[in-house]
Image (tube, helix red, strand yellow):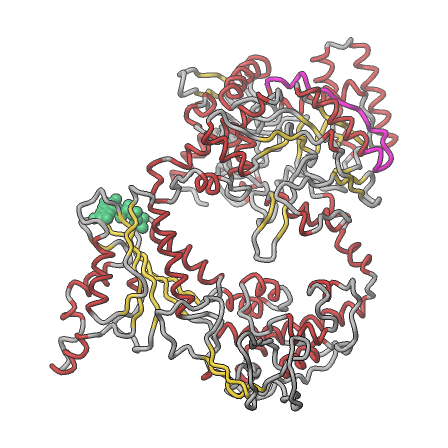
Amino acid sequence: MGNSSSTKKNQSKCPFINNETSPPLSKANDEIKLIWTPDIKPLKLRNYQTGEIAEVTGPITNKYNDCRQHVCTSTYMPLTTHPHQTQIKTENSINEFESLDENYVKKEAHNFLSIYHNDMKTSENDYEKRLKQVNLEIEKTGTYIHKTDELEYGCQLAWRNSSRCINRLYWRTFKALDHRNIRTNDEMFKAICDHIHFAYNGGTLQASVLIMNPKSRVWSSQYFRYACYEQSDGSLLGDPANLELTKIAIQVGWNKIEEKRTQWDLLPIIVQVEPNEDPSWYELPDDLQFQVFLSHPDKKYDTAIKSLGLRWFAQPYVSEKAIEVGGIFYRCVPFSGWFMETEIGRNLCDIQRYNFIPKLADLLDMDITAAANSQLNIDRLYVEINASILYSFEKAKIAIVDHHTAATGFMKFMKAEIKQRGNTPCDWVWIVPPISSGMSSVFHQEMLNYVVKPRVVDQNEPWLNYTPMKKHKDLLGIPLNKRIRHRWLILRAARVIIGFALVAVKQRISVNVLYASSSGTAYSYAQQMYKQLLYIGYNPLLNELDSFKFLQHNNERSINLIITSTFGQGNASDGGIKLEEWLKNPEKTFGKNSNEDKLISTMRSPLMWCTYAVCAIGSSAYPFYCGFGKLIDDTFEKLGGTRLIPFTMCDALNQQFKSYNQWETIAIHTLRSIYPHACLRPEILSTSSINTNISPGQEVNLNNSFRSDYNSLEFYPEKIKIQQNQSEEKGVFTKDKPYIATVIQNIELIENEDKSSNIDNEHSVRLIVFDTCGLSYLPGDHVCILPENSLTNINNLLLACDWKIDDERLDQHCSLSSFTNNKYNTIREILTYYIDLNITPKPHVLNTISIYAKDENEQRNILELGIP
Ligand SMILES: Cc1cc2nc3c(=O)[nH]c(=O)nc-3n(C[C@H](O)[C@H](O)[C@H](O)COP(=O)(O)O)c2cc1C
C-alpha cells in the first residue's frame, strides 16, 4: 500500500470511488465504504469483439465486499476449491444465528416491496396497505411473513442478481414451491422428493426453488453428491469435493461397507428441520436417482468413456445457499436449473475432482505429459468429454445447454438488463466458460460485479453449529476420565509403534533420484520416481544433478537414478551444467593437484562407488538426440560406475511417457531384486531393553521415541532360538504333528548375494540353518517357516497398550479377530503371527500416527520419517 503513481492510476479506474472527492490516502481511508452513487458519471463498458460500448449506471448499494480501495479482487473466489483447503467465507456470507436488526429488516422490506409494486404493477392502494401491514408486523415481532407471490418474485430476482450465473436469461421462469410450514425431518425429505419430481419434469427440467422453514437446513450441499472415502493407502475413492460431507454422513449414521464402496456412491440427503433438532439422513428412492451414463458418437472415445463408467446427475440442485428477500434470510431454499456441459466436464476432469483425463489418456494411448503439451492432447480429451456430455444428455432427452449457447443467451440478458435497469452485476471470472474461453462472446465483454438485493448468499456449514463431533463422542458413551485415559494409551502405543517404525525407517535403502530439467518434464518424471520409491519403502532423495557431490563422495556405495533432459546443442539442461563440465573434462575434474600415482588410480575408477541408471529425456527432432544423457551414461561407465540397467532414451515425439514408464518399471524391479527394502542390516542392531516405565497419566513426549537408546528392539540377531526342539520323540511327522526344528543360524545375505539372480522382490535373502538332529526325510517332505515377532517386541507393545487380556479369547465377531478371518483368536496370537511389527511404515501410516503428536515439532518429526 502506498500513494505511488501506479496506485493512483488504478484507483482512477475504479468506478466505486469518487475520484474528485477522494481524500488523500491514509489507513483510515481503507475503511471507506464503497458506494455506487448516482453522482458517479455513467461508466462505459466495452465489448472487444463487436466494438460496442454500453453506457451503464449502477444500483445504489453501500456494501461492496469483494473490492478494496487499492486492490481489485475480481479473481478472488472464497469458495472450497480443494478438500484440504479450509473454506473461507466472504463478509457476504451469513451466520446461522445472526440476529437481524429491526431497522435493517424494515428498510430492506420497504426496498423490496417497492420493487415488487413497480414490477408487478400493483395498485397504489394495495401497496400502501401492504406497507402498513408489514411495518406493524415488524414492530410487533421483529420480522414479517412474505406472501407466496412476493416470495416467488423475490427468488426470481435473487437469480436475476446472482452475478456468477451465466443462465440468467430465464430468471422469470423460476418457480417457487412454498413449503414454509414443514415441521419434521420426514416432511422435509418428502418435500425434497416432490421437488425432484416436479423439477425433473420428464427430462424437460423446470427451474425451481423449494422454500422451507427459514430455520431448517439441508446439510447436503446438493441433493445429488457422490461420496468420497479416504483409503488405507492415502488415496481417495469418489468425488474429492465431498470428502467432508461423506465424513459427516458417516457420523450421522450412514455408511457403506468397505467392500461395497465405489467411486459413484450416492450420498444420502441429510436434513435438519430446526437448529436444536437432530439431523436425519435419507437415501433417495431409485426412481428419483436420475443419472446420465456417458457415451460418445466416436467409437474410439465411446469405448474408453464407457469403460471408465463416466456419468453425472441429470440436474443440479444446490441446497447449501441462502436467499435474502426483503431483509429475511431463507436458509433452506434448494434450487434447481439445468446443467451447462462444462460444469459436468469440470467435475469429471478438474485435477482436484475426479481427474479423469489421465485415465482416459491412458486408455486411448495418448501422451499428456508436459513433454506432449504442444500436441494439446489434454485439451482434445477435455473437449471430447464435454462433447460426450452433450451427446449423452441429448440421447437421454434431458435438457442441457452448451457453453456457446449459454454465452449468447447471457449477452442477450445483459443487453436487456442494461436497457431496463442500467446494468446487471456480473462476475467475469465465473461467467466466462472454462473451455475455449476466447471463442465465447462473454470473454470479450467488460463487466462489473457488485451486490444487488434480493440475492443468493453463502452461509456457514450447518454442522458447525450443531457440533456433531461432540454428539458423536457422547454416543460412544465414553466418560470424560476414560477418554483421557484412552488418549494416554493411544499415545503410549504410538510411542512404541514409532519405536518399531523408526528402526525400520532408518534401515531403508537410500536411493538418489537426480535430475536436470529445463522446462520441467524430466523433473516431473523424477518426482514420479521419487514417489514410487517412497511408497515401496525405500528412502529416496530427490535432487538436481549439480547438487550431488560426485567429486567429494566418501566412496560408500550409492545408488543414483538419473533422469535428465538435453538442451541447446546436445547440452545439459538446467541443474546439470556443472556435471557436464566435469564429464567433458575428467582430467581437469579429477585431480590435477594430485601426485601421479594417485591421479592414475583415481582416474581409472573415480566413480567406483556409484551404481547408476540413466534415463535420457529428449526429442529426436534435434541432431544431438539425448546428447547429455548419453554423455553421462558413457562417461560414468568409463569412470568405474556400475550400470544398474541399460541406458534408455525417451523421445518427446514418440510416446515419451511410455518409454519413461518402462524404464521406471525396470529400474524399480531391478532395485528390488538387488536391494530388497525390507532387509535389516545387522550392524545397526541394538540390544538394550525398551524403557516402559511410564505410569498412567504421565505426560508422554513423543520425542523420546526418537532417542537412539529408546529403539532397543531385537531384530534378527545372528542366532535366534525360535523354539526349543520339542520333538524329542522320534516317529512319523505329519502336517498336523510337525517336527519343530531349532534355528541355529539366521543371516541376512545382502552383501554376498548374486545381483544378477532373479530374487523374489518382496523379501530379504537369508541363510537359515535348522537343527534337525539327524532327522531323516523323504522326497516330498517339506520345510515350512512360520515367522513370528520377537517376544520382547510383543511384550513391550502389550505393556504400552495396557492390554492385560492378551491371552483371553476374543469374541468371534470382534473386528480384530475377524480381520484375521478368525484364524487368530487372542491379542497375543495376532501380535505374534499376524501383524508384522518390523515392517517399514508407509507414509500414510506415519500420517495417522502423527495425528496423536501433541506439538508441531513432534508431528513434523514423525512425518519426516515418511518424507525425507
Ligand atoms: C531450445 C531447445 C533445444 C533442445 N535441444 C535438444 C537436443 O539437443 N537434443 C534433444 O534430444 N532434445 C532437445 N530438446 C528437446 C528437449 O530435451 C525436450 O523437449 C524435453 O522433453 C525437455 O525436457 P525438460 O522439460 O525436462 O527440459 C531441445 C528443446 C528445446 C526447446
Q: Is residue 698 above or below residue 28?
A: below
Q: Residue furthest front?
A: 778
Q: Which residue corresponds to the image point at 22% horizontal and 74% vertical from the top-left?
A: 606
Direction from residue 184 to residue 735 in the image, left or right: left
**Residue projecting furthest to the left:** 596
Query: Where 289 falls versus 1 (above or below)?
Result: above
x and y percentages locating residue 649 in the rendered image = 28, 52
Residue 42 can be seen in this image: no
Q: Residue at horizontal 69%, vertical 50%?
A: 247
Left or right relative to 193: residue 380:
left
Magenta stretch in the rendered image: 169-188
Asked if the stretch drawn in magenta spans residue 178, the answer is yes
Residue 66 as seen in the image, left or right of residue 134: left
Residue 604 is at least partly visible in this image: yes
Residue in front for this viewpoint, 514 or 407: 514
All told, the count of numbered labels is 0
Q: Nearer the viewer, residue 203 or 278?
A: 203
* Frontmost residue, 445 versus 353: 353
Left/right placement of residue 228 relative to residue 633 reads right
> Residue 399: x and y, percent?
61, 21
Q: Residue at x 45, y 21 (%)?
A: 441
Query: What is the quadrant of residue 154 in the picture?
Result: top right
Q: Quadrant of residue 564?
A: bottom left
Q: Position of residue 26 (x, y in %)?
A: 50, 43
